[in-house]
Image: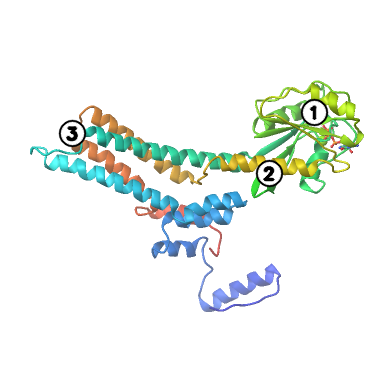
Amino acid sequence: MLEVSLHGNPVIVRHFILSVCDALHIRPANPGEFTRRAFQNEKLDLLAAEGVRSIIDARSVFELHASRKLYDGELTRMISRFRSALIHLKAETEAEVDFSTEDLTFESREETIERVHDLRRRIADILERSRSAARLSDGMQVALSGIPNAGKSSLLNQILGWERSIVSEIEGTTRDFVSEEIELGGIPVRFVDTAGLRESEDLVEKEGVRRSQQQMEKSLLIFHVCDLNREPYPEPVFPGRPVWHILNKADLATEARMKAWKSELSMKAADRIYPISCKSGEGLNTLRNALADYLKDETESVDPFYLEERHRYHFQQMDGALVRLLELWKNDAPAEICALELDSALHHCGELTGNISTEEILGRIFSVFCVGK
Ligand SMILES: Nc1nc2c(ncn2[C@@H]2O[C@H](COP(=O)(O)OP(=O)(O)OP(=O)(O)O)[C@@H](O)[C@H]2O)c(=O)[nH]1
Ligand SMILES: [Mg+2]
C-alpha cells in the first residue's frame, strides 16, 4: 500500500491519478468494488453488503440504527429461520410423495397449515416494520401554518438557527412553501414554512395556499402559529392531524389576551398549547424539547427495519407462494404440485441472501455504492 499526500486542488489530484494509472497499468476501483469482493469471497452476505450502503446513506442516528440491523445480520438470521421452516415443509411434502402408498402417519395437515400461517404472519410483520421505517424517515414532517403575519417564518428561522425564510411585516410574505430538515434528538425532521392561510384573489397567493394545504396533509404534526398581538380569531380548518397551537408574540401579549386565546382554541385530544416569542426567545426551548420527546415516542412505538425495494419484492413473492400452497392443500392437490410452490418460496429466500443471484442483479446492487467502498 502506498499513501500519497497532495495539494487539495482536485485538478492536481485527478491528473496524478491518471498519470499513476497510466504508468503502472492499474485502474481506479469501481463503485462498491471492495464490498463486492467481500461478498464474493464470502466475508459478507448480500444483505450485509446492502447494509454497508444504508449505513453510508443514513441521514440520522435513527436511520443508522435501523440500517445496522441489516449489517449485523438480524435479517439474515430471520431469513435462515424461514429457510429451515420451508425446507422442513418441503421434506415432509416429498416424504408424502415417496411414501404415499405406504401407511405412514405424517404430521397432521392442521399442524402444517398452522406452520404456514405462522410464516405468513412473520413475513407480514417484517413488511409492516419496514413500512413504519419508511414512513418515519420520509414522513417526519411538521408544517408551520396559520394566518399571514403570525410569525411562521420567524419560527422556522428560530428553529433552524439561521435566516432561511424571509420575514417581514407585510402580510403574504411567504408565498411558496419553504422547507428544511434538521436533526432533533437523533431523528431527522423536516419543517415546512407555508404561505399564510387567507382568502385571496391573487392567483399566485392562491396557489401558495393550495400547496400549503398539501404540505399539511403530508405532515405528522401541524404547528398552528397564532398571533397573540391580535384578538382571538377563528382558527383555520386543519386536516386530521394533531395540532400544536403556538401562541406567538408572547412579548406583546397581556395575561388577559393570553387567557382569551387559550379559551378560544378548540382542543382535540392530541392537541397542545405552547406560548412563545420569536423576538425574545421565550418558550422556544420548551417547544423544541417537547417536539424532540414527541418524535422519540413516535419512533420508539415501532421497531423499524429498513428493507430495500428488492427485499420487499422477494418477501411478497414468498408470501404469494405460501398463499397458493394453502389453496392447493385446501383442494387436496397432489403433493408434487404443492412442492413446486415451496420451491418457489425457497428460491426467493435464496435471492434475498444472495445464495442465488444473477450477475445482472449483483451489478445493479453494487453500482449504486460510492467509489472506494
Ligand atoms: N413582537 C414580535 N414580533 C414578531 C414575533 N414573531 C414575528 N414577529 C414579527 O411579525 C411579522 C411577521 O412575521 P413573519 O415571520 O414574516 O410572519 P409569517 O407568518 O411568516 O407571515 P406570512 O409569510 O406573510 O404568512 C414580522 O414583522 C416579524 O418581525 C414575536 O415573537 N414578537
Ligand atoms: Mg412567512
Is 262 on the left-hand or right-hand side of 169?
Answer: left
What number is the disc on residue 334?
Answer: 3
Residue in the image at 37% along x and 53% along y: 358
Up/down of 353 relative to 334, above or below: below
- For label 1, the crowd category at 10 Å Cα-Cα, with few meaning under 14, some 14 to 19 and many 20 or more, is many
Query: Is 351 drawn above or below residue 225 in the view shown?
Result: below
Mark found first going from the N terminus, 3 or 2 = 2
Decide if ligand 1 comes within 8 Å of the CB at mark 2.
Answer: no
Label 1, label 2: how far apart the Cα atoms are: 32 Å
Q: Nearer the viewer, mark 3 or mark 2?
A: 2
**In terms of depth relative to the viewer, which is nearer, 244 or 133?**
244
Give percent across and percent down for residue 320: 35, 35
CA neighbours of label 3 inside 10 A, class few (<14), some (14 to 19), many (20+): few
Query: What's the amino acid at mark 2?
Result: Ala
Looking at the picture, how far across and down is residue 106, in whole percent? Answer: 17, 39
Q: Tell me which colouring the rendered structure shows.
A: rainbow
Residue that numbered label 1 is attached to: 205
Decide which of tag 1 and tag 2 comes sooner along the chain: 1
Q: Are marks 1 and 3 in contact (CB under 8 Å)?
A: no
**Amino acid under label 1?**
Glu
Instruction: Answer yes or no: is residue 139 visible.
Output: yes
Where is residue 333 shown, x and y percent of the image? 20, 31
Quadrant of ligand 1: it is top right
* Real-space Cα separation, disc 3 to disc 2, in angstroms: 58 Å
Which numbered circle lies on residue 292? 2
- Determine which quarter of the picture holds residue 176: top right
